[in-house]
Amino acid sequence: MLQRWRYDTYAIKQRRRVQNILKTKESPLAAWESLAKRYIIPPAPPKAQIKEMFMVEDAVRVAEHDGIMYKNIRYASFELQTYLQRVGIRNKVQIRYDPNDIREIAVWDEIAREHFFVPTKRENCPALSFAQLDKARKALRTPEIEELETQAILAEQQIYEDFKDKNRKGLSKKRREAMQIAATRNVEFIERSNHAPGVDPTNAAKPKREKPSLVMPNNMPKTNKNRKPL
């Protein structure tokens, strides 16, 4: 609704603050088109390049036949498997990752001299940051597991939130406001989890969830409609 108003209403209406060279009012769309004819507007970077911009941390890991393990999260894909067949298993690979999203890493291709993206082995992984995952594990005080299960992450995060709620009594106002901001961030990463990495959830359409189909057995006992209640 907001995007439709921005392009179909706001962009085509003349604005007092938008003026052409003759100092007359002009619509934002007309101003954009006239400036595009006079100046070179570079095209928007591709989605792969935008995702790579946020992967500011790097590391070196040994690639196994079943993927790459980082922070006890296993990353695997068909593209990674094909690359390892060319360079060999148990070779060290350079990776980059976004510290605010555990769902995907970038692996450096030594042959093509470019990065390719590898998701987590488990599907539907929530959009947690590595710091949030570490806090949840420390709150539980449990040993780290080899594989990262999606349900385990959500359970860890919920237990961590419950653990914080029990200690909110007696906190200062400033501390409670900070915790409220953190709770807002949790809502944001849950919203981001419903979309693929690199997709802005504010502009993307919410994915439709398929309704599960239930198969009823044929030998269900028949109910007596004439039976009187006790």
Image: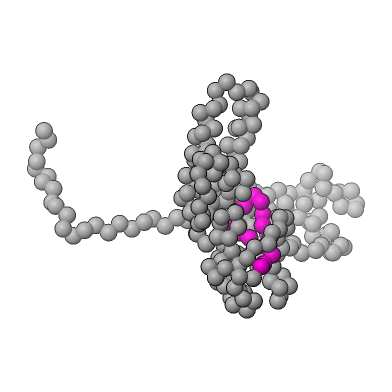
* Left or right of 135, for residue 14: right
Name the residue at 59% across, 77% down: 85
Asked whether 185 or 68 is in front, the reply is 68
Which image quarter holds the C terminus?
Answer: top left
- Above or below residue 61? Residue 133 is above
Q: Position of residue 82 (x, y in %)?
A: 58, 75
Most extreme residue toward the top, as rendered? 170
Asked whether 66 or 205 is in front, the reply is 66
Segment colored magenta? 92-105
- Above or below residue 173? Residue 210 is below
Q: Position of residue 78 (x, y in %)?
A: 55, 71
Where, by quadrant of the figure, is residue 98 drawn?
bottom right
Asked if residue 85 is among those painted magenta in the image, a careful observer would answer no
The colouring scheme, among rainbow, by chain, secondary structure or one colour, is one colour
Name the residue at 39% across, 55% down: 211
Q: Does the rendering let one see residue 79?
A: no
Where, by quadrant of the figure, is residue 63 drawn?
bottom right
Name the residue at 82% across, 48% down: 18
Q: Does the rendering let one see residue 26?
A: yes
* Left or right of 114, for residue 159: left
Q: Position of residue 54 (x, y in %)?
A: 70, 55
- Above or below residue 152? Residue 114 is below
The count of marks equals: 0
Q: Position of residue 34 (x, y in %)?
A: 83, 59
Name the residue at 69% across, 68% down: 108
- Above or below residue 51? Residue 129 is above
Asked if residue 97 is among those painted magenta in the image, a careful observer would answer yes
* Left or right of 220, for residue 95: right
Asked whether 153 or 33 is in front, the reply is 153
